[in-house]
Image: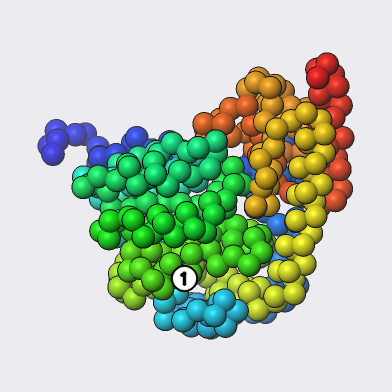
Amino acid sequence: MTLSASAPLPQPGILDIAPYTVGESKADGANAITKLSSNENPLGPSPAATDAVRAAAEHLAIYPSADHLALRQAIGDVHELDPAQIVCGAGSDEIISLLCQAYAGPGCEVLHTEHGFAMYPISARAAGATPVSVPERTRVADVDALLGAVTEATTMLFLANPNNPTGTILPGAEVARLAEELPKHVMLVLDGAYAEYVQDFDAGRALVDAHQNVVMTRTFSKIYGLGGLRVGWCYAPDAVVDVLHRIRGPFNVSAAGLLAAEAAVRDVSWTAHCCAENAHWRLWMTEKLRDMGLAVDDSHANFVLPRFAYPTQAQAADAALRAQGIIVRQVAGYGLPAFLRITIGDEVACRRVISILRDFLAGQGT
Ligand SMILES: Cc1ncc(COP(=O)(O)O)c(C=O)c1O
């Protein structure tokens, strides 16, 4: 310890963290903005969720439920899960952070995939652990590489499936092989933030039931359209649930968030409608982008990731969209400098993106 420090010092590793870059929401000079930079649902939440927030506004002085029982029961009913194995958090970001706090620390290694979600290394470092990036195979997680990267020091492995920002999915059999072959002291966190966009997909629920070291995280920020309220959850083995309840704040999810999420998860027809709309416009966008000569992997989420000829062309395309008030996401920080991640917006937004990019590429002589 440095006794002579003239000011309090953060724990080792904290100053190595580059703060998370959020999707931008402003563009200089543009009046009307279309934000396609944070994978939000363009259709918004279920009307029942909005009504729940209005009702919650009448009781703002009262602390929320500390056991989240009504929300856990609603999630359990809809997803056929035991509510006792569900823990709710302020977004799945909080769940990721709590898991790292509990299962990683100084001397521990936390594995994540090469183009994995940025909060994994941030949360690992915040806990004092060392994040380890594991190469993917053409933007898809590589199970052999992940297993090969495990050392005695490894305590956690994060895998988003589908992944952000690539939109790619690792087939179920490969995820099952990873869970099977991973040493039992390593926690496998299957991040299902985009799970609802995939048909007939359990996002790892059966693997949680089969293995004591597998946890599935989920969010209300994507298809449920409640990013502004910060609600996420995980489904985990009993021992992990017990640990998370010991370290989470008792009132970590707001009353409005709990009520809105409960209404949202029960409105399965709204969720199905959002899923169908997203699938329709995602396919349309993918085809139009490919028609322009841009390479696009099949996306299983609510965004697409076109590849431009070179990084400066991606930046120029971003600027062309921004000049028309459309904000997408540069992903150089994810090791993908020639790509742009574009959230699937509503029909108007999708058509505008394609028209602007078509004009942009025509101007480039492509
Ligand atoms: C893969 C993945 N996991 C987790 C999150 C965090 O979501 P939230 O904290 O809003 O639940 C995101 C948000 O973009 C994400 O893309």
Nearest to the observer: residue 236 or residue 50: 236
Q: Position of residue 13 (x, y in %)?
A: 29, 39
Under circle 1, the secondary element is helix
**Residue 84 is at least partly visible in this image:** yes
Which residue, given by chain and number where applicable, does mark 1 sit on? 206
Amino acid type for the residue under numbered disc 1: Ala
Q: Position of residue 312 (x, y in %)?
A: 65, 20
Residue 220 location (% of width, % of height) = 59, 64
Q: State whether residue 219 is above or below residue 61.
A: above
Point 55% across, 36% down: residue: 138
Residue 249: image quadrant is bottom left
The relative height of residue 12 versus residue 215 in the rendered view (above or below) is above
Image quadrant in which you'd find residue 135: top left
Q: Quadrant of the N terminus?
A: top left
In the picture, measured across the screen, residue 303 lies left or right of residue 63, that is: right
Task: Answer above or below: position of 171 versus 30.
Answer: below
- Quarter holding residue 351: top right
Farthest residue in the top direction? 365
- Using a 10 Å C-alpha cutoff, classify the residue at mark 1 as few (fewer than 14 neighbours), some (14 to 19) or many (20 or more): few
User: Is any atom of residue 21 visible in this view?
Assistant: no
The quarter in which the C terminus is drawn is: top right
Instruction: Choose between 15 and 161: the one closer to the eye.
Output: 161
Seen in the image, is 221 located left or right of residue 72?
Answer: right
Name the foreground residue: 281 vs 348.
281
Could you say where residue 230 lies in the image, as x and y percent from the top left? 55, 62
Q: In the image, what residue occupies the spot 55% across and 67% down?
A: 202
